[in-house]
Image (cartoon, rainbow, N blue to C red):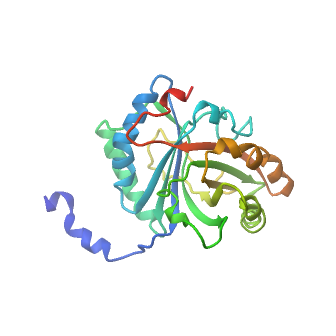
């Protein structure tokens, strides 16, 4: 068995390289199951792929799934999105943290294991990747300063809602300025007194050339910023005040434009709760 699994090398691998807890990287994947396949997709993802295709992999140390029921999909902005076409596409969202400095190690494993899963017939084909990318961490803004959960806790803490926001800078040269404005000026004021405990910022990275063919290459890697807003309440009550005007707020800065603001609630693992509320 040792020869088949190369287990003798595990002790050597464990002794080298970064092994902190900071989420230096993330996998963020928003997927639309094809009509009529919602139940089958949910069961495949929860019963197999979440584990075999994600959490069992080296250096992917936290994960959580989210869902947008039809009423949540209809809250999304803008109506014409460069990310989701139509803007309601992508009713399931999965988020994963990857240890800082371990992106290349994880990527080599994930490409290999997904090729194996595909050969073994363990990949559900009746789905469309709307927004799937690995991302580099740019920073985290906290509502309560040093109090409360940190970003490395975020996918295990029982947050009641998540908002995925995608903002495109006016160009590659403007992205750094956009990120600085978000971190230092804009987000601290937005979070103050709100149900949002933290906002985690990322930038997308290109997918490897040997990725699976059904996952399209990432767009906007030079100017895009991805924000995850972690909410202590359901997003619906706070949406009008906190998120409905996001397009105008960002546009007024002159630094970028909101291409997607999409609210989600957590799934309940092991159940098909919400599957009948997607259409």
- Image quadrant for the N terminus? bottom left
Residue 29's place in the image compared with 189, above or below, is: above
Query: Which percent across, then down, holds residue 74?
Result: 67, 32
Q: How many numbered discs, if any?
A: 0
Residue 202's place in the image compared with 46, above or below, is: below
Residue 12 placement: quadrant: bottom left
Q: Nearer the viewer, residue 65 or 137?
A: 65
Residue projecting furthest to the top:
36
Q: Nearer the viewer, residue 46 or 84?
A: 46
Q: Nearer the viewer, residue 128 or 65?
A: 65
Query: Which percent across, then down, holds residue 131?
Result: 57, 43
Position of residue 268 in the picture relative to residue 16 (left or right): right
Position of residue 32 in the picture relative to residue 42 (left or right): right
Q: Name the residue at 41% across, 73% down.
A: 19
Residue 63's place in the image compared with 269, above or below, is: below
Q: Name the residue at 57% across, 62% down.
A: 136
Query: Which percent across, then down, holds residue 35?
Result: 51, 24
Q: Nearer the viewer, residue 224 or 258?
A: 258
Position of residue 146 in the picture relative to residue 24 (left or right): right
Q: Name the residue at 75% across, 58% down.
A: 190
Residue 138 placement: quadrant: bottom right
- Image quadrant for the C terminus? top right
Q: Name the residue at 36% across, 61% down.
A: 58
Query: Which percent across, then down, holds residue 175?
Result: 73, 61
Residue projecting furthest to the bottom:
15
């Amino acid at each position: 068995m040792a020869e088949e699994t190369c287990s003798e090398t595990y002790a050597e691998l464990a002794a080298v390289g970064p092994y902190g807890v900071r989420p230096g990287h993330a996998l963020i994947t928003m997927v639309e199951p094809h009509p009529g396949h919602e139940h089958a997709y949910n069961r495949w993802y929860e019963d197999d792929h979440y584990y075999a295709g994600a959490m069992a992999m080296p250096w992917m140390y936290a994960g959580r799934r989210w869902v947008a029921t039809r009423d949540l999909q209809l809250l999304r902005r803008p109506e014409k999105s460069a990310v989701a076409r139509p803007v309601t596409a992508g009713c399931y969202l999965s988020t994963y943290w990857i240890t800082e400095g371990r992106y290349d190690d994880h990527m080599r494993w994930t490409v290999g294991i997904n090729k194996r899963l595909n050969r073994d017939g363990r990949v559900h084909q009746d789905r469309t990747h709307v927004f799937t990318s690995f991302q580099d961490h740019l920073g985290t803004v906290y509502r309560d300063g040093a109090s409360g959960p940190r970003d490395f806790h975020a996918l295990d803490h029982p947050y009641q809602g998540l908002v995925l926001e995608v903002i495109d800078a006016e160009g590659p040269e403007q992205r750094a300025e956009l990120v600085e404005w978000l971190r230092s000026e804009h987000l601290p004021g937005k979070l103050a007194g709100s149900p949002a405990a933290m906002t985690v910022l990322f930038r997308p990275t290109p997918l490897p050339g040997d990725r699976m063919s059904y996952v399209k290459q990432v767009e906007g890697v030079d100017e895009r910023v991805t924000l995850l807003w972690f909410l202590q309440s359901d997003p619906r009550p706070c949406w009008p005040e906190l998120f409905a005007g996001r397009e105008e707020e960002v546009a007024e800065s002159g630094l970028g434009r909101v291409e997607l603001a999409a609210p989600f609630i957590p799934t309940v693992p092991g159940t098909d709760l919400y599957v009948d509320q997607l259409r």
